[in-house]
Image: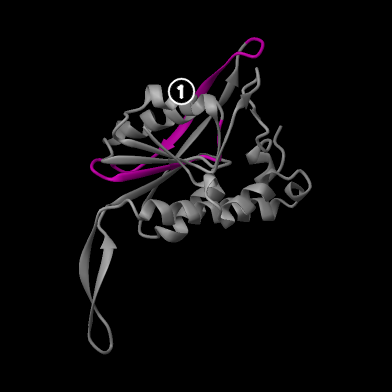
Amino acid sequence: MKVINLGQKNSVLNKFVAQMRDKDVQKDSMRFRRNLERLGEIFAYEISQTLNASEKQVVTPLGIANMLTYDDKLVIATILRAGLPLHHGIQNYFDDAQNAFVAAYRKYDKGEDFHIQIEYSSTPDLTGKVLILADTMLATGASLEIAYRKLCEDGEPAHTHLVCPISSAYAVEYLQKHLPADKVTLWVAAIDEELTSRSYIVPGLGDAGDLAFGEKK
């Protein structure tokens, strides 16, 4: 699995990530959502450069322009709920893409043990298409792997781009072991080294869903 860390380059992306991490700026949930959306737009632009493309003729009021545009059929998927602003940002650029959604969460057993519970999935046929699966935080990697395999029950994508702005080093290694090496690319903005016993990323940014949409029970 190829891993691309956009945060290693000097760009405005790092400013947005810094604001998302800042405990004072986080108090503005609208800014948090907007920064996630901005990240989605940046990731979409970067992914667009990897797609198959061909030259097409476009008729203008004055003549014909030859334009190089992508050919791949795209499906944008996200894990509810924290991934929604990120999904929206990607969709802003790939506005002709189909969409898919997965509801997955940690269901705690005894003590600190948990398993990933999927309660809802909606997706078009993925056969031969490019899947972009977005989730804000990648802690253990388990929920993303399960969501990926659930989506692939509706056809095998030609390639999958995983968009996860904040990831743990543990999750990167986990996905490299459990997902197809030649058919998956992981895009991140930061890789944090520490993962707590309760599978929280440190320094991370906290609960992305709560920061974007308010606290839940």
Residue type indicated by callout 1: Tyr
Question: Residue, x 65% and y 20% (percent of image)?
Answer: 198
Q: Where does the magenta region start and end?
A: 110-138
Compared across the picture, whether 216 is left or right of 43 comes to right
Give the x, y percent position of residue 163: 46, 42
Spot the residue most to the bottom: 62
Residue wearing tag 1: 174
Image quadrant in which the C terminus is located: top right
Residue 45 visible here: yes
Give the x, y percent position of residue 69: 28, 63
Residue 16 vertical position relative to residue 194 in the rendered view, above or below: below
Spot the residue most to the right: 24
Residue 126 inside the magenta-drawn segment: yes
158, 115: nearer the viewer = 158
Question: Residue, x 35% and y 59% (percent of image)?
Answer: 96
Give the x, y percent position of residue 202: 66, 30
Question: Residue, x 65% and y 46% (percent of image)?
Answer: 212
Compared across the picture, whether 184 is left or right of 173 comes to left
- Secondary structure at badge 1 equals helix
Residue 118 visible here: no
Residue 181 inside the magenta-drawn segment: no
Give the x, y percent position of residue 70: 28, 59
Compared across the picture, whether 217 is left or right of 53 comes to right
